[in-house]
Image: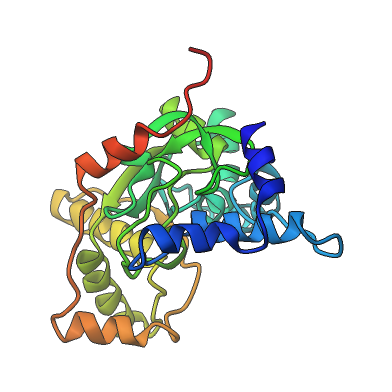
Amino acid sequence: MGGVGLLLALRPHQAGRKIREADPDTPGSLGIAISEAVEVAANNEDTKYSLGSVLNHVLMHQTVIGEEALQQLALVEETPDVVIGCAGGGSNFAGFSFPFVRVKLAGKMDPVIRAVEPAAAPSLTRGSYQFDFGDTVGMTPLVKMHTLGHDFVPDPIHAGGLRYHGMAPLVSLLKEEGIIEADSLHQTETFEKAVQFARSEGIIPGPEPTHAVASAMMEAEQARESGEEKVIVFNLSGHGHFDMAAYQEYLGGTLTDYEHPAERIAAAMERVPVVGG
């Protein structure tokens, strides 16, 4: 109820202004953007806020991607050993992987299903599994998820939509139950593999799917070294034609890695609401 009371008391864009006043150099975050969007919708009768990520209905709609992938594999009579997708809030990863999760739980195949996230925003690999707000100010309902703390502000890395503080509740639960696994990669190693991929395949991946591309290539390299045959399926979910500046930074040697400090994660987690004592 505290979040609702705050929402009604705020003027449009007041959330962002307050955050900017507290930290004029803030690079912003998806959590801040959600706070502002919800605030504008709540204060204008002719405005609606469409929940386009993380929540269950979005994950369900996205699963058309994984369903098509299953049918494509059936056409070539292949069964995957490893299924890999990039993960930020979880919609992309869930849309690709959940149909494979369904078949895995039915006992019809048993692939490793891996979510790959940036080391700079590692909610699945370093976050805590508990109730938290989906936005920075605390306007949204509490959801149980892997979180780095709702006021987490990531370093301005080249990972696009993978810079969110939390993970979709269903993805978080699957990770907690051990049905999927998670890994985190630094941005320089993802761009290294993305350049190699572009030169061999003629496709320039966006910064988000570079994480899946890099993990799949590493998996293939390990299989080659061990002499093991593997069917590896990954989701190349977007092109990098609008991200050439990031590639230029990488090729110019100015793209650097960043790992979110443990003390900053701990400080953010202290401000996460405690539910159920």
**Farthest top residue in view:** 277
Q: Quadrant of residue 188?
A: bottom left
Q: Is residue 245 above or below residue 3?
A: below
Is residue 110 visible in this depiction of the protein? no
Locate the N terminus and report the quarter of the image it occupies: top right
Question: How is the rendered protein coloured?
Answer: rainbow
Q: Is residue 32 above or below residue 110?
A: below
Viewer-nearest residue: 108 or 120: 120
Is residue 266 visible in this depiction of the protein? yes
Q: How many marks?
A: 0
How far from the left and from the top, in percent, is residue 137?
A: 53, 47
Q: Is residue 96 left or right of residue 124?
A: right
Tell me which residue sits at (65%, 53%) in the image.
10
Tell me which residue sits at (21%, 72%) in the image.
192
Q: Quadrant of residue 163?
A: bottom left
Tell me which residue sits at (26%, 72%) in the image.
191
How far from the left and from the top, in percent, is residue 207?
A: 38, 71
How far from the left and from the top, in percent, is residue 277?
A: 48, 12
Q: Is residue 248 left or right of residue 205?
A: left
